[in-house]
């Protein structure tokens, strides 16, 4: 975790204090259930909760000092609790194994992280929706392969992003549900030394579902899916960021990141206004995606259970969620404050002498009786003259002067084919599909 790219709420989820608090709740809830079943005395569970009610400060340094001797983090934690609670603490962890605590805790942390990320996505979706309706009918050029294609609206670009991040939200909701599972099944997952009702009780208290079958560890395909979804969200962040970066290029300049008073773009060139936020987002997306492959590799454990996944998850759990949280918040700010230049969009639309209307002419010629091959050739031979003139010539005027074209279409018909509003006639339909 790099503090530069971290926000406090998400970072707190991965703190030692939060981890140990969750460990305690798992152990105490399990002891409650064991007491209800008569396996341990009621006084044991009461002693744990009475101590916890005093709001003790979790002494991370003391736990770490014990672990330095035991070389086992869960045992170190249980030892520290016992030193504070007293004799009744001996009934804690009855029939449980370390993975019961570690895996259930990780499920809680990932669910907590997912909740923050879902709120982040809601904020981003709100910002995108506002800008989409603001520029619903703002005409701009649509590009394919980086080349002018046909007119669209800037609102449609935003609507596309809205639909994409809506899918991201649905995937994350599903991934959260899949990851939020509890396993309190003991060594090798057979419940030999602990009743399955303990697992059900702990799961209910922590807002988790029970793991149907664990091998002592929760199956890591769940985690692989979770981190894969984070990777997809990161890729969607990058896609929108790359578009903003393109729009801010000097030759394009249809939109740009907000440039605040006093901001500097370059240490050498005072005129520079660089897309630093979206460039940063491209880099952050790479880092989030870097967690996906290790998560996939964690699925296969030796003989059903080992801890090769543990060290990996100590990295990717905090790093991927903290980085994605920061990236979503940053992208929301970019979209919210994005400077949009409709006049430059119109200028770019007009940049190539009407070439963006070539398909309408092609279709009109076919409807007027010309073969598609001949229609294409007629339009292309005039379009290439415009292209080679760098937009100084007008496609409409060249077509009007082409006898083979005017033999099929009148000047008035040709002029009508260059109407920009034609391309916006179904914007409402698309918006209804996206925004309902």
Image (cartoon, helix red, strand yellow):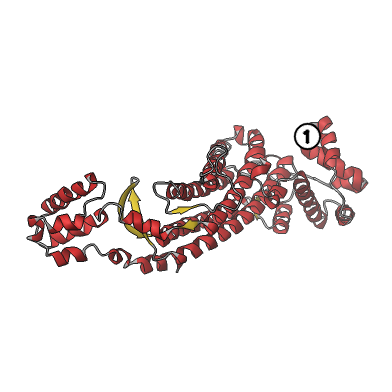
Tell me residue 41's x, y (percent).
Answer: 87, 53
Residue assigned mark 1: 72
Instruction: Please state if 230 lies on the left or on the right of 102 as rendered.
Output: left
Tell me residue 71's x, y (percent).
Answer: 79, 31
Find residue 361 and report its image quarter. bottom left
Q: Quadrant of the N terminus?
A: top right
Q: Secondary structure at mark 1?
A: loop
Instruction: Please state if 387 lies on the left or on the right of 143 as rendered.
Output: left
Find residue 205 and report its image quarter. bottom right
Q: Nearer the viewer, residue 183 or 102?
A: 102
Q: Nearer the viewer, residue 197 or 119?
A: 119
In the picture as drawn, the residue positioned furthest to the right comes out as 86
Can residue 184 be seen here? The reply is: no
Tell me residue 16's x, y (percent).
Answer: 76, 44
Instruction: Please state if 282 lies on the left or on the right of 23 as rendered.
Output: left
Tell me residue 376's x, y (percent).
Answer: 15, 51
The residue located at (47%, 59%) in the rendering is 162
Can residue 270 be seen here? The reply is: yes
The residue located at (56%, 57%) in the rendering is 121
Instruction: Please state if 313 lies on the left or on the right of 368 as rendered.
Output: right
93 up-or-down from 300: above or below:
below
Q: Nearer the viewer, residue 129 or 206?
A: 129
Q: Quadrant of the C terminus?
A: bottom left
Find residue 158 and report its image quarter. bottom left
Pointer 1 local density, CA inside 10 Å: few below 14, some 14–19, many at least 20: few
């Amino acid at each position: 975790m790099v503090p530069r790219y971290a926000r406090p709420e998400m970072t707190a989820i991965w703190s030692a204090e939060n981890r140990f608090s969750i460990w305690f709740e798992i152990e105490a809830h399990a002891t409650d259930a064991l007491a209800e079943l008569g396996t341990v005395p009621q006084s044991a569970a009461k002693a744990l909760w009475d101590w916890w009610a005093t709001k003790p400060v979790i002494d991370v340094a003391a736990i770490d000092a014990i672990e330095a001797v035991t070389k086992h983090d869960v045992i170190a934690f249980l030892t520290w609790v016992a030193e504070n609670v007293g004799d009744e603490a001996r009934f804690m962890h009855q029939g449980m194994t370390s993975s019961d605590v570690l895996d259930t805790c990780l499920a809680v942390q990932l669910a907590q992280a997912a909740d923050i990320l879902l709120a982040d996505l809601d904020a981003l979706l709100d910002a995108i929706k506002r800008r989409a309706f603001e520029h619903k009918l703002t005409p701009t050029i649509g590009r394919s392969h980086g080349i002018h294609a046909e007119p669209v609206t800037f609102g449609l670009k935003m609507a596309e992003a809205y639909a994409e991040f809506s899918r991201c939200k649905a995937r994350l909701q599903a991934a959260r549900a899949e990851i939020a599972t509890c396993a309190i099944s003991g060594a090798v997952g057979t419940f030999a030394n602990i009743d399955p009702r303990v697992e059900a009780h702990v799961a209910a208290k922590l807002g988790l579902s029970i793991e149907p079958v664990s091998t002592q560890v929760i199956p890591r395909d769940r985690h692989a899916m979770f981190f894969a979804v984070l990777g997809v969200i990161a890729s969607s962040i990058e896609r929108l960021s790359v578009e903003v970066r393109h729009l801010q290029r000097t030759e394009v300049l249809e939109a740009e990141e907000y440039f605040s008073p006093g901001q500097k773009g370059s240490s050498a060139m005072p005129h520079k206004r660089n897309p630093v936020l979206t460039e940063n987002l491209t880099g952050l997306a790479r880092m989030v995606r870097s967690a996906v492959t290790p998560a996939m590799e964690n699925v296969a454990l030796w003989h059903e259970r080992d801890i090769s996944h543990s060290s990996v998850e100590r990295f990717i759990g905090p790093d991927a969620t903290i980085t994605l949280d920061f990236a979503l918040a940053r992208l929301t700010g970019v979209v919210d404050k994005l400077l949009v230049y409709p006049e430059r969009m119109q200028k770019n639309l007009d940049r190539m002498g009407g070439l963006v209307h070539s398909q309408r002419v092609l279709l009109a010629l076919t409807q007027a009786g010309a073969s598609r091959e001949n229609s294409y050739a007629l339009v292309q031979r005039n379009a290439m003259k415009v292209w080679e003139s760098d937009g100084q010539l007008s496609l409409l005027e060249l077509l009007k002067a082409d006898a083979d074209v005017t033999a099929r279409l009148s000047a008035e018909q040709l002029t009508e084919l260059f109407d920009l509003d034609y391309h916006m006639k179904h914007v409402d339909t698309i918006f209804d599909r996206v925004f309902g």
